[in-house]
Amino acid sequence: QASRQWHPEDTIIKTAHTRLGGNQFTLIAGPDSIESVDHIFAMADAVKHTGATILRGGSFKPRTNPYSFQGYGEAGLKAHRAAADAFELDMMTEIMDTRDFALIDGYTDIFQVGARNMQNFSLLKQLGAQQKPVGLKRGMSATIDDLLNAAEYILAAGNPNVFLIERGIRTFDHQYTRNTLDIAAVPVLQKLTHLPVLIDPSHAAGAHDLVAPLALASAAIGAQGLMIEIHDHPKEALVDGAQAITPAELEKIMQQTQAIRLSL
Ligand code: PEP
């Protein structure tokens, strides 16, 4: 069902505050993690000003080290929901475990499946059995076909509202970039599937100064949106501060991506 052969027209996903897919360029922005009520409200205010329509932020964090900050759980979801409502944004947050479904479903508008859970098949089936949109991130070692098959699990279970997010894959050089952004994945996926294809330059880069060039390249190659991490004080971020850009930097990126898109 993910194939363009089966469904030639682009899928358009409609949410309360935005649309994803087709000619739409959708910006998802926010902090890596929900840190406090005041912080997510400040970030939501900044996100709204940039023209973003979806407020991201993790309350259940997939950390490599079990002793690292794991997210604030339900308290984070509550703060995230309140901030999204206050600024008329859609809420998007990560789900890692089927056991958290009812809790997260009670708050979020859009589910995020992270790179590490791209092939968590029971989670994909569960998200397929409901209709809220699912942003499916490419696993760090996943091929294009692996990603499409993962999307197929959600579609086959009955949910057509799936969008794909390229967020960099593992290659052999981790000295200068955290992952390697597979920019060619955008036209390749757009040829193979009708599902919206977005790029997350933050997790691809792992470094704040690379976010802008990768975002601009994403717009130039025809990505249907971006997911970008912001923080007002990146050095104090609880998670992944090295890749966070400031709201002012995001605003500049959005102006530049708009100019690139108009010139296409
Ligand atoms: C995230 O977006 O918060 C995240 C953990 O990303 P990824 O799954 O791509 O590593």
Image: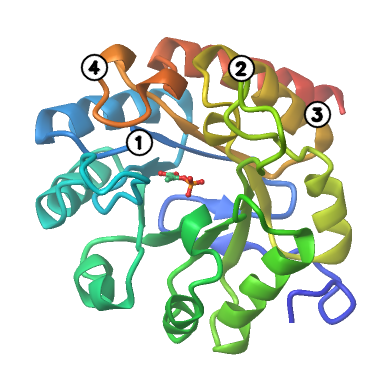
Mark 1 CB within 8 Å of ligand 1? yes
Helix, strand or loop at label 4? It is: helix
Asked whether 214 or 196 is in front, the reply is 214
Mark pair 4, 3: CA separation: 32 Å
Disc on the earlier residue, 4 or 3 = 3
- The reply, left or right, for residue 83 in relation to residue 213 is left
Asked if marks 3 and 2 touch (Cβ < 8 Å), the reply is no
Residue 220, labelled with which disc? 3
Disc on the earlier residue, 2 or 1 = 1
Disc on the earlier residue, 4 or 1 = 1
- Against 258, is 11 above or below? below
Helix, strand or loop at label 2? It is: helix
Amino acid, disc 1? Asp
Q: Report the residue marked by disc 2.
A: 210
- The reply, left or right, for residue 178 in relation to residue 67 is right
Which quadrant of the view contains residue 31? top left
* Residue 135 screen position, x and y as percent: 52, 58
Query: Looking at the image, is mark 3 or mark 1 nearer the viewer?
Result: 1
* Residue 19 screen position, x and y as percent: 56, 54
* Residue 223 screen position, x and y as percent: 73, 41
- Against 114, is 223 above or below? above
Amino acid, disc 4? Glu
Q: Report the residue marked by disc 4.
A: 236
